[in-house]
């Protein structure tokens, strides 16, 4: 039992040294699913091993200087800020000016290798889009149905029905499911093309993509069965007023699009 505790302590100290010795600023170079990893000496490209649990030599993103030594030209796109405990790292997202680098690692192989530094794994995780599906419900008076949210980022505010998509569903199906779950409202989506918007809202670098569909409904609001821990009320609003009160960037963009 004492031996097991000793191993655990060594592993924790090794992990802490790895975090502490990591460069403050690194570059996430990505080209069509391939990313550049280097070892602790800055030599690359290095290839991760999917499912590796033991701690081998740490693999990480390169620094700006290491990329220069490798002779790679690249364009900077944005910065992501990552914090682990009291340590803050800057990950610069970049696009390399070269042909598809087949000898680089697949980004999907990075996540499950314990020897890849957490900064690289976190940055790649954050680069995966979060998908949201919503629906604009209108009546014959061209009023917009909004729901008052009871939890999450928009608590107490009015938003379009919808939410995060399930892993295996089409966005058109997702907004219908969300309307049924939140409001007890069975919708038929019309043939209008969805309004698609994308935005990164903070230096954390997480990207959201929203698909907003449209539907018509003439039912009685009193007949709706609200999911009370999520939605506290529903109401019809004039389009212009709806645009003025929704706090969601995606809702605002979608409503302005149907007005135009």
Image (cartoon, rainbow, N blue to C red):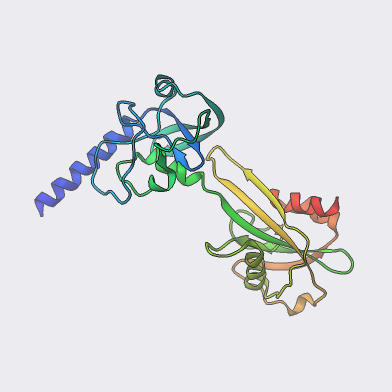
Q: Quadrant of the N terminus?
A: bottom left
Which residue is depicted at the point 63% across and 61% down? Answer: 171
**Left of 12 or right of it: where is 1?**
left
Residue 33 percent location from the top left of the image: 48, 43
Q: Quadrant of residue 145?
A: bottom right
Residue displayed at 50% across by 23% down:
73
Instruction: Give the side of residue 259 with respect to residue 55, left or right.
Output: right
From the viewer's side, name the closer residue of 247 and 200: 200
Q: Residue at x 28, y 37 (%)?
A: 16
Residue 61 vertical position relative to residue 239 in the rendered view, above or below: above
Q: Residue at x 39, y 36 (%)?
A: 103
Q: Is residue 171 above or below residue 77?
A: below
Pick out the residue farthest to the right: 141
Of residues 26 and 98, the one nearer the viewer is: 98
Task: Say if residue 164 shows up in the picture.
Answer: yes
Residue 248 visible in the displayed image: no
Residue 87 location (% of width, % of height):
39, 34
Q: Position of residue 155 (x, y in %)?
A: 63, 57
Q: Position of residue 64 (x, y in %)?
A: 44, 23
């Amino acid at each position: 039992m004492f031996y097991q505790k000793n191993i655990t302590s060594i592993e924790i100290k090794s992990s802490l040294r790895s975090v502490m010795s990591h460069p403050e600023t690194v570059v996430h170079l990505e080209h069509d699913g391939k990313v550049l990893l280097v070892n602790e000496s800055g030599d690359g490209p290095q290839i991760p091993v999917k499912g590796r649990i033991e701690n081998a030599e740490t693999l990480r993103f390169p620094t700006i200087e290491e990329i220069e030594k490798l002779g790679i030209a690249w364009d900077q796109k944005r910065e992501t800020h990552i914090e682990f405990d009291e340590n803050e790292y800057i990950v610069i997202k970049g696009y390399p000016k070269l042909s598809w680098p087949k000898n680089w690692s697949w980004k999907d192989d990075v996540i499950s290798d314990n020897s890849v530094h957490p900064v690289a794994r976190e940055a790649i995780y954050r680069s995966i889009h979060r998908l949201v599906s919503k629906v604009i419900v209108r009546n014959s008076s061209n009023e917009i149905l909004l729901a008052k949210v009871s939890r999450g980022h928009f608590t107490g505010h009015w938003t379009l029905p919808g939410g995060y998509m399930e892993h295996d569903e089409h966005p058109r199906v997702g907004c219908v499911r969300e309307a049924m779950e939140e409001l007890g409202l069975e919708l038929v989506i019309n043939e209008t093309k969805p309004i698609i918007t994308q935005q990164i809202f903070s230096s954390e670098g997480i990207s959201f993509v929203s698909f907003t569909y449209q539907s018509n409904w003439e039912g009685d609001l009193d007949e709706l069965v609200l999911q009370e821990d999520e939605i506290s009320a529903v109401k019809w609003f004039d389009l212009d007023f709806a645009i003025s009160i929704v706090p969601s960037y995606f809702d605002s963009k979608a409503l302005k699009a149907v007005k135009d």
